[in-house]
Image: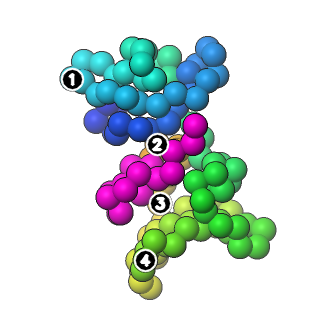
Amino acid sequence: MKAEELRIGNLFIEKYTQQLINVEELKKDKIVFSGKFLNEWQAEPIPLTSEWLLKFGFRQAGNTTIFKEIGSIEIGKIGKRFYLQIRCENITLNIKYVHQLQNLYFALTGRQLLTIK
């Protein structure tokens, strides 16, 4: 995990307590998670699962498809493959973690993806 890949509000898991934490501050030499400085190895990225997508307001369509429409943009997952569809153009994405989806959503919409407390 590199600081330049993160945004304030990104969700992670604290390695030893398994508590949900979020990025609160990004500085040149440190990252502050939920009010405390943690080394990079103390915070683990959260694997992006179907359950997380549903928590973020994505909708289930059939057994293998989960998606969210944002105007003419659709972000979704079919089986294990994530995709981005803009109008009729499909792009396969390599998204493995919750914070990557949060960053993509913000880049596309200028808004935070619903944050889970």
Instruction: Tell me residue 75's x, y (percent).
Output: 51, 67
**Can residue 43 be seen here?**
yes
SS state under label 4? loop
Q: Which residue is mark 4?
A: 71
* Contact check, label 3 and label 4, Cβ < 8 Å: no
Question: Given this view, does label 1 or label 4 mark the residue nearer the observer?
Answer: 4
Q: Which residues are magenta?
A: 101-117
- The mark that comes first in sequence, 1 or 4, is 1
Q: Residue at x 42, y 19 (%)?
A: 35
Q: Residues within 10 Å of mark 2 (few under 14, many from 20)?
A: many
The residue closer to the viewer here, 1 or 26, is 26
Q: Which residue is mark 1?
A: 28
Instruction: Tell me residue 90's x, y (percent).
Output: 46, 76
- The mark that comes first in sequence, 2 or 1, is 1
**Can residue 104 be seen here?**
no
Report if residue 108 lies within the magenta region. yes
Q: Which quadrant is the C terminus positioned in?
A: top right
